[in-house]
Image: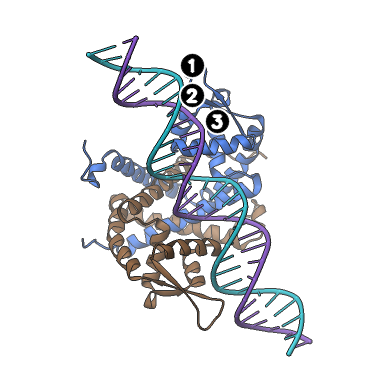
Chain colours: A blue, B brown, C purple, D cyan
Amino acid sequence: MAARWLDQREERAWRSLMKMQDSLSEFIERQLRNRCGLSHADYQTLAHLSEAPDGRLRSFELGALLHWEKSRLSQHLGRMQNRGLVSRTRCLTDQRGAVIAITPEGRDLIAAAAPQHLTDVRDVLIDHLTATELEMLATIGDKVHERLAALQREPSIHDPTATT
Amino acid sequence: MAARWLDQREERAWRSLMKMQDSLSEFIERQLRNRCGLSHADYQTLAHLSEAPDGRLRSFELGALLHWEKSRLSQHLGRMQNRGLVSRTRCLTDQRGAVIAITPEGRDLIAAAAPQHLTDVRDVLIDHLTATELEMLATIGDKVHERLAALQREPSIHDPTATT
DNA sequence: TCCGTTCGGTTAACACGTCAACCAGCCGGT
DNA sequence: ACCGGCTGGTTGACGTGTTAACCGAACGGA
């Protein structure tokens, strides 16, 4: 398999994206943890819960919003429950189910974290890009995500053993 | 603290970037692991080693190239050593030091993985973007990385009013 | 009704990353 | 030569993500 190598422009774009990805997520993670004691995963979980009616969601609904594997969700919710950020109760209409609810402590935390997080996002990305750049960033992100979603729907492209 | 919220365009760009980041790294990680038994971390480690003279580097040099914490590097090299991908020997000129070398097995693996990895990068990013988009992606990435590097150098991280 | 299948969720085992502590070797000033 | 600080590297404890196995409840035919 003689793969076409990347030319200079392509190489630069790829490396730059990788570097941005690394440093950006590292920064977000660190800021949230140092200032609020929350991981980005905690933040997103609380954000979704706080936006839900009554601050409660079925476990699988939360999982769908976060695009998390169910075992990851279960483990993470267990830890968040131990820290008093969420509560877990059995679902009345489906005996299998769990209802996840944000606690007052969780609400306080996300309420304090959100503005700071927002400031960080501005400080490190939004405020340093032009409207054109923002527009194109969204376009690029959507294209890539679209392509990846297509690949996931069509595994046969990369996995000839797939039986559809 | 009434933080300025994101307008629609900004929100879209941020969300799109986050989604791309998640799905992209998940894809890269999965492809490498399923087809070559390598994590992205393994891949980058082997890539740097294979490009070094004689396929060997001092541990701290490798750490600098990867931007990894020293403990992470140490742990990861231990696991890679157990798998026979790298070897660790004491440095002759500095009794503290470790010299990391890629093994023939490691070379074989990265040689097999690189073309496939490259194909994936093309398939999912490069080949679906225009030259303009690639150019702008690099520009954006550099801007963000520049800003983050500046923040890391500045002790005034806690002063979000600082405008460059 | 009964039985196989799917669904929602938990658990155990493992790979991975971070932090803090630690150790030995180097280095510089005195 | 000595001593304190720095440097290169390892270790242990802990939080986190993935995989695979598992369980009970719901569902969907015969």
The label shown at residue A24 is none
Q: Position of residue A144 (x, y in %)?
A: 35, 46
The label shown at residue A97 is 2
In this rendering, the answer to whether A94 lies above or below A9 is: above
Q: Position of residue B124 (x, y in %)?
A: 31, 50
The amino acid type, in three-letter code, at marker 2 is Gly
Instruction: Decide which of tag 2 and tag 3 comes sooner along the chain.
Output: 3
* Mark 3: few/some/many CA within 10 Å (<14, 14-19, 20+): many
Q: Is residue B7 visible?
A: no
Quarter in which the N terminus of chain B is drawn: top right
Q: Position of residue A67 (x, y in %)?
A: 43, 37
The label shown at residue A49 is 3
In this rendering, the answer to whether B95 lies above or below A81 is: below
Chain of the residue under label 2: A
* Mark 2: few/some/many CA within 10 Å (<14, 14-19, 20+): some
Q: Residue at x 53, y 76 (%)?
A: B97
Horizontally, residue A38 falls left or right of residue D17, namely right
Instruction: Decide which of tag 3 and tag 1 comes sooner along the chain.
Output: 3
Quarter in which the C terminus of chain B is drawn: bottom right
Dot 2: element = loop
Q: Position of residue B63 (x, y in %)?
A: 50, 67
Q: Residue at x 56, y 40 (%)?
A: A42
The amino acid type, in three-letter code, at marker 3 is Leu
The amino acid type, in three-letter code, at marker 1 is Thr
